[in-house]
Image (tube, grey):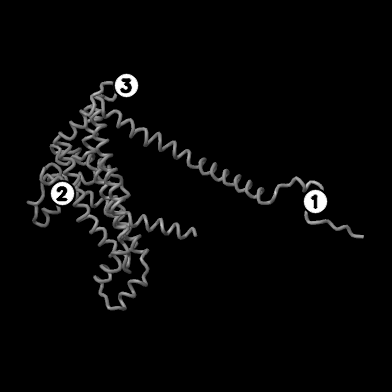
Amino acid sequence: MTSTFLPDERTGPDVDRPPPSATAARGRGRRRAYHWLTAVGFQLPALVLFVVLVLLPILFALYAAFFRWGGFGMPSDYIGTENFTRAFDDPVLLGDLWRCLVLVVLSVALQLPFALATAVLLNQRMRGRAVYRMLFFAPYVLSEAITGVLFSMIFAPGDGLADQILGGVGLDGLGGEWFADPSMVMATLFLVMTWKYFGFHMMLYLAGLQSIPKELTEAALIDGANAWQRFRSVTLPLLAPTLRISVFLSVIGAIQLFDLVWVVTQGGPDHHSETMAVTMFQFGFKRYQVGYASAISVVMFGISLVFALAYQRFVLRRDLEGATTTMRGGGK
C-alpha cells in the first residue's frame, strides 16, 4: 500500500530550509559585494596615485600661492592675495595671455584646417598613402626637446638650412634671425608647432573619416552631389564631434605650452615668445619665487578648468548626451 502525503507535509532536514527566493537574494547580495570589492581593489591603486600625484600638488600650489615662499621649508610668510594681484598687474603675464590667444587663433584657423585637408587627401585611394601617413605623423612621435634642437639648427642665422634654401632661390632677404627677431619669433615658433602637432590632429581626422559609412557618400554621389557638396553636407557634419575634440585639445595644449618654447627660445627675445608655463618656470626655478610661481600655476589651472567646463557645457553637450543615450539604449 503506497503512502500519500499532503503537499504541506514535509519531514527531515527540508523542514528548516529557507524558501528558494531568500537563498537567491542572499546569493545575489554576496555576488554584488564581491563585484564591488573587486572594483574597489582595481581602482584603489589608480585613485591613490591620482590623489598623491595630482590632487595634493594642486591643493599645495593653491596653498603656497598665498605666501611669499622661496621653495625651502614650509611656507610661513602669509601675504594673502598679493601674488594674484601682482600676477594680473604683471605686463609679462598679460603678454603671455595675449600670445596664448594668438596661438589658439592661429591653430584653429590654420593648423587644424591644414590637418583636415591632409586627412581628407590621405583618406582617398592612392599609392603609398600608408607611407605618407607615417611620414606626416612621425614628427608628433619626436620629443619636444629633439624638435626644438632640430629647428634651432634649421633656423640658425646665416648658415641654417632655412637661410641657405632662401638664398638658393634668390630670397635671401626673407631670412634673418628667426628666433631672435621680436617681429618674427612667434610666426617661426608657430611654424615649428604646426610641423610638430598637425600629424596628431590629422590622425584624429583620419579615424573620424574612416568611421563614416561609405553608403552615405555614395548615396549623395548618386543624387548628383559634387565633391564639395558631399564634403560640406555629408562628411563635415558627421566629422563634427572629432573636430570639436581636436579644437579642445589644441586650445588646452596652447595654454599649457612649455617644453618646445623653452628648448627653442626660453621665452626670448625680451619675453616676446614667453608663455604662462615658461613664466611660471622662470619665477619658480630660476628666481626661487615659488609662491608667485604657484599663483601663476593656479591662474593657468583656473583658465584651463573654466574653458574645459564651458566647452563641455556649450560645445560638447550634444556629443555627450548622444553617448549617454547610446549607452542607455545598449543596456536595455
How far across and how far down the image is residue 101, in percent? 19, 47
Q: Nearer the viewer, mark 1 or mark 2?
A: 1
Badge 2: residue crowd in 10 Å (few <14, some 14–19, many ≥20) = some
Query: Disc 1 versus disc 3: distance between alpha carbons?
Result: 78 Å
Q: Residue at x 42, y 59 (%)?
A: 326
Query: Disc 1 versus disc 2: distance between alpha carbons?
Result: 91 Å
In terms of secondary structure, where does tag 2 sit?
A: helix
How far across and how far down the image is residue 321, in percent? 37, 56
In terms of secondary structure, where does tag 1 sit?
A: loop
Query: Disc 3 versus disc 2: distance between alpha carbons?
Result: 42 Å
Residue designated by label 3: 73
Q: Nearer the viewer, residue 210 or 46?
A: 46
Marks 1 and 3, the one that precedes in the sequence: 1
In terms of secondary structure, where does tag 3 sit?
A: loop
Badge 1: residue crowd in 10 Å (few <14, some 14–19, many ≥20) = few
Check residue 310 in the rendering and tell me which mark sits there, or answer none: none
